[in-house]
Amino acid sequence: MSDSFFKAIADPNRRKILMLLKKHQTLTPGEIGQHFEFSGAALSEHLKILRTADLIYAQKRGQYIYYSLNTSVFEDIISWIMQVIDKSEVKDETTK
Amino acid sequence: MSDSFFKAIADPNRRKILMLLKKHQTLTPGEIGQHFEFSGAALSEHLKILRTADLIYAQKRGQYIYYSLNTSVFEDIISWIMQVIDKSEVKDETTK
DNA sequence: TAAGTATTTAACTAAATACCTAAATACTGA
DNA sequence: TCAGTATTTAGGTATTTAGTTAAATACTTA
């Protein structure tokens, strides 16, 4: 279970970015930035962290970059939580 | 959706504590500490963060404190993730 | 009551994080 | 090619976090 996932979603602004992408499917950094007060550079950092955690992916078309959700990693955290609360199959990860 | 939850699970040592509690149901800080290299004080801090996020609860009996998982908050994160990835709600087999 | 064990709190340090501004890179269209 | 727009990178700062050791608190038992 990747540390980068948990780090990525630990920040409320990054969770908000995910919700925005959920709502609009595809957004450029410029469009995302309209929902925040901080600089474009700060936004770029957040996007990098989300990209590294594989939560979003970027497609460059010309001058713009289009960001979208990559939902597959979310499935992993659901499995992790299921394990903790004992709802479904259990593999022992206590040594990780 | 509480920030303290995401902060709490962002740390791998705290996630390991949760898995240990999942496995053993109830553990004292002393028993938990045997699985880590850091000081008891550091462990105490981690337990406080997990308590604040409502992920575990403590029962004091005499000289010992017994920690257990509080699974109800995990249901909340599952809902949050379901929302992000646009899945229908997970069926709830547990009562709380 | 005193000594011993269990756990938390306090005060501190080092490293990580989240932001900033400025500069760099990449593309578009005149 | 040049000016303009979009985005990222670099370098810096303030805040937060995760750990430390030492002291405090709480309980047990001789």
Image (tube, coloured by chain):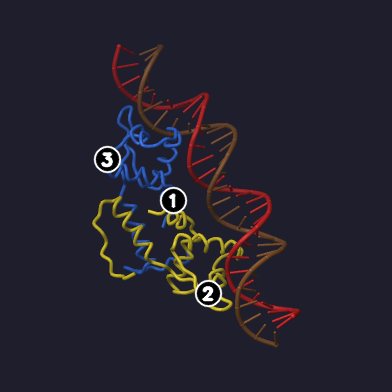
Chain colours: A blue, B yellow, C red, D brown
Measured as percent of width and height from the top left, residue B61 is found at 53, 78
Residue nearest the observer in this picture, A33 or A65: A33
- Name the amino acid, label 2: Lys
Mark 1 closeness class: few <14, some 14–19, many ≥20 residues within 10 Å? many
Give the residue at mark 1. Answer: A10
Q: In the image, residue B11 lies at what x, y percent?
A: 49, 56
Residue located 31% across and 70% down the image: B94
Residue A45 percent location from the top left of the image = 45, 38
Label 2 belongs to which residue?
A: B60
Image position of D28 with respect to A77: above or below: below
Q: Residues within 10 Å of mark 3 (few under 14, many from 20)?
A: few
Tell me the element at label 2: strand
Image quarter of residue C29: top left
Alpha carbons under labels 1 and 2: distance apart: 30 Å
Query: Is residue A2 or residue A7 the one in the foreground?
Result: A7
Above/below status of C30 relative to A33: above
Marks 1, 3 in one chain: yes
Residue that numbered label 3 is attached to: A24
* Residue occupying the far left of the picture: B88
Task: Read off the chain for label 3.
Answer: A
Ranked by sequence position, the earlier of labels 1 and 3 is: 1
- At label 3, the amino acid type is His
